[in-house]
Image (cartoon, grey):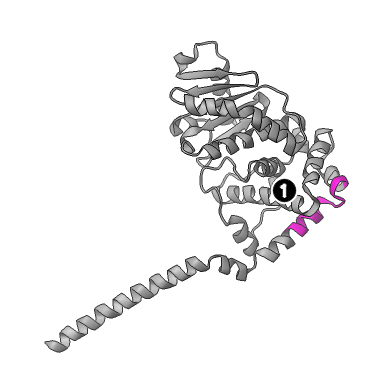
Amino acid sequence: MKNIVIRIFILFLILYFPVPAHAAGFDIIRTDEVTIKYDKGLTGVSNEIARLIPTLKAELQKRTGLHFNFYFKIMIYGHRETFRRLVDNEMIAAFAIPKQDLIVLDQSQFRYDSLTIRLLVMHEMCHLLLHKNIAVNNLPRWFDEGVSQWVSEGINEIVSPRSTDALKRAYISNTLLPFSTISETLPSDPVNLILAYEQSRSMVDYIEQTYGVDSIRGIILRLSSGAGFDDTVRDELGAEFTEIEKNWKKDKGSQYTWLAYISNQLYLILFLVAAFLTIYGFIRLRKRMRDYKDDEV
């Protein structure tokens, strides 16, 4: 907790201490919607982000039903080691601080991928938008993360791997995380952190597929009016969340059987079998050649 406070204080000084931007190694772009402070040398990507902001705001408003009508700030770092001073987890390449209407990006992790930049900024903007409109005690951490991935086509703050089969493996091994355990915070260990992200996205997708896209907006708007999450789900979806969680598991079960898992890994299995047979054949050949030489002697 102490480390987090120190890091936020450092960001506060960088953002607000009245010294010229060039003195601190930063340049600044200011528009009617956002202030972007960035490491020197990142003018191109910063201008691109500034250009995208109006479009991203409109898309977020359409997807969530919430109005993005507040000013916010973005800080962009170009060096991993500098960004890492602000976060404990080496897997993270971006984060949002809703209380300061602030997004912090590590551009070194996605410098060659303009689509990822667009979706990642949209993801972080969604976090700001949800927290601006919904009280933190009514916004489960997994729902916050799930909706932000939902609007950004699955992109999240994790550097690598972007997508894994963590959810599939967790279902098969019966190690899924109860959603009640990821309502306040997400795990810090890499394996369960990735699983928490995948479960969050999967649950939001399941709600959309089962109840319709309007149900996601309905939940968001009810929460923004001050309703609690459990009451919101019951009123919007007509079922307790515990029941929905059970049905979600059943739905995963129809996809994630051992047979389905093995069939999805078929190419890998065939490759491993072929590699084994090649090595085995080579060893047999070497042995036969050695035996042949011995017979000649």
Q: Look at the image and tell me in which quarter the C terminus lies.
A: bottom left
Residue 5 can be seen in this image:
no
- Residue drawn at x 45%, y 19% is 25
Q: Report the quarter where the N terminus lies.
A: top right
Q: Where is residue 107 in the image (x, y as percent from the top left)?
A: 49, 33
181 relative position to 281: left or right: right
* Residue positioned 57% across, 40% down in the render: 157
* Residue at (75% x, 53% y) in the render: 209
Q: How many marks?
A: 1
Q: Is mark 1 on a helix, strand or loop?
A: helix
Please indicate whether residue 65 sits to the left or right of residue 264 in the image: right
Horizontal and vertical percent for residue 93?
53, 37
**8 magenta-colored:** no
Looking at the picture, tell me which residue is in the foreground, 57 or 83. Answer: 57
Disc 1: CA contacts within 10 A as few (<14), some (14-19) or many (>=20): many
**Which residue, as the protein is rendered here, is positioned at the far left?**
297
Evaluate whether residue 20 shows in this view.
Answer: yes
Provide residue 173's location: percent of width, then percent of height: 62, 63
Above or below, 239 against 1 in this view is: below
Q: Name the residue under label 1.
A: 204
Q: Relative to 179, say whether 116 is above or below.
A: above
Nearer to the camera, 185 or 75: 75
- Amino acid type at circle 1 is Val
Q: Relative to residue 295, is residue 67 depicted above or below?
A: above
Q: What stretch is highlighted in magenta?
A: 235-248
Q: Which residue is drawn at 75% across and 29% down?
A: 67
Q: Position of residue 169 (x, y in %)?
A: 59, 60
Which quadrant of the structure image shows residue 176?
Answer: bottom right
Quadrant of residue 137 within the rendered picture: top right
Give yes or no for residue 240 being in the magenta stretch.
Answer: yes
